[in-house]
Amino acid sequence: MFKICKLSSTMLLLFITVAFFPYFVKSRIFIYYGCSQEKFQPNTPYETNLNSLLSLFVSSSSQALYNSFAIGNDTNASSESAIYGLYQCRGDLRSPDCTKCIEGAVSQVGLACPYSYSGSLQLDKCLVRFEHFDFLGKLDTDLRFKKCSKSVSHDAQSVRHRDDVLTELGETNQGFRVSSSSLIEGFSQCLGDLSPNDCTSCLGEAIVKLKSLCGSSEAGDVFLAQCYMRYWVSGYYDSPSESSGGDDVGRTIAIIVGVVAGLTAFIVLISFCRRSPGNLFIYTSPFGLLTYKWIKRTKIKLRLS
């Protein structure tokens, strides 16, 4: 029988997050995530509001592909508990598919950003974001993620077709847009909190970054804070060597690193064990926040919900 010793919450959460995060991420195409360095304490009003916000993301996604919320920002509430957030699904998704994507993103952002005041997570077909400050409707064109395929030689006509697609994608001032010209295809989308003018500005910046960062690449993705744009040569994503090879290698490496790191953390955890004051119960909130507590009993029970 194992005896589980009392460890710091930081070490325990690190062990569980590293060990299990790859399992949750690998089921969907993961683009990027970001978390604030500042953390909140468990069992505080901010945690309650965050759980409410994430719950609203899921429930609302069955009715709309985009929505934003502000919780705890009224005059009677403490500013420390205020939280602002939004979710958005890709414009070509049906409501059931949107809900599935948001459910996955909500569970993953809780694992990726435990107890962070701010967090964002972008999957291939949806985004969730929450902040401690009011960011809604404020233009932000910071680069969050870019991916360019290998560079190839293009004739002037191919470059013109690509530029035609990018120009058309940048002309939308709201919502989701698809474009094609000859063998070049693409789509773009702004977040629903942007005004038409700000959406145009954001997409214009995305075009500049695609041209400067991806150059003569067969495919390019640019995700800014409030919009994204992608283009590719027709058939590019149908090629196993191009569409999945590099990403699969990256995901495989991440999974291997996660497993090795998790086993290492487990060995370290066991090596520090001496005598526990009771039994360790580990569980999660509905949205992936990890919690543990000690109960004075003689038999160990380990539960993951």
Image (spheres, rainbow, N blue to C red):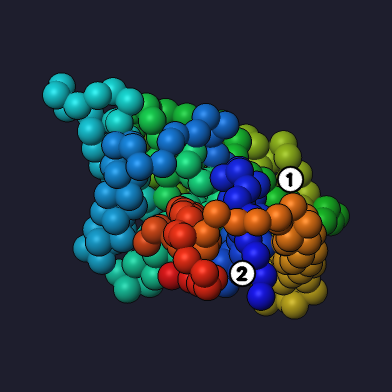
Using residue 56 as the reference point, say whether residue 156 is left or right of it.
Answer: right
Which residue is rendered at x = 29% and y = 42% of the image?
A: 49
Instruction: Name the residue tied to disc 1.
Output: 214
Which residue is rendered at x = 34% and y = 67% of the image?
A: 99
Of the two numbered discs 2 and 1 in the rendering, the one whose residue sits closer to the viewer:
2
Residue 230 rendering spot, x and y as whole percentages: 58, 53
178 and 123: which is toward the camera = 123
The quarter of the rendered structure image containing the N terminus is: bottom right
Q: Callout 1: 10 Å neighbours few (<14), some, many (20+)?
A: many
Quick check: 136 above or below 188?
above
Residue 298 rendering spot, x and y as whole percentages: 52, 69
Asked if disc 2 and disc 1 are in contact, CB closer than 8 Å, the reply is: no
Using residue 218 as the reference point, say whether residue 282 is left or right of it.
Answer: left
Q: Is residue 116 visible?
A: yes
Marks 2 and 1, the one that precedes in the sequence: 2
Q: Callout 2: 10 Å neighbours few (<14), some, many (20+)?
A: few
The quarter of the rendered structure image containing the C terminus is: bottom left
Instruction: Name the residue tied to disc 2.
Output: 23
Using residue 299 as the reference point, say whether residue 63 is left or right of it.
Answer: left
Residue 232 rendering spot, x and y as whole percentages: 65, 60
Kind of residue sitting beneath label 1: Cys
34 and 215: which is toward the camera = 34
33 and 215: which is toward the camera = 33
Q: Secondary structure at mark 2?
A: helix
Residue 254 rendering spot, x and y as whole percentages: 74, 61
Which residue is rendered at x = 38% and y = 30% of the image?
A: 132
The residue furthest left is: 76
Q: Secondary structure at mark 1?
A: helix
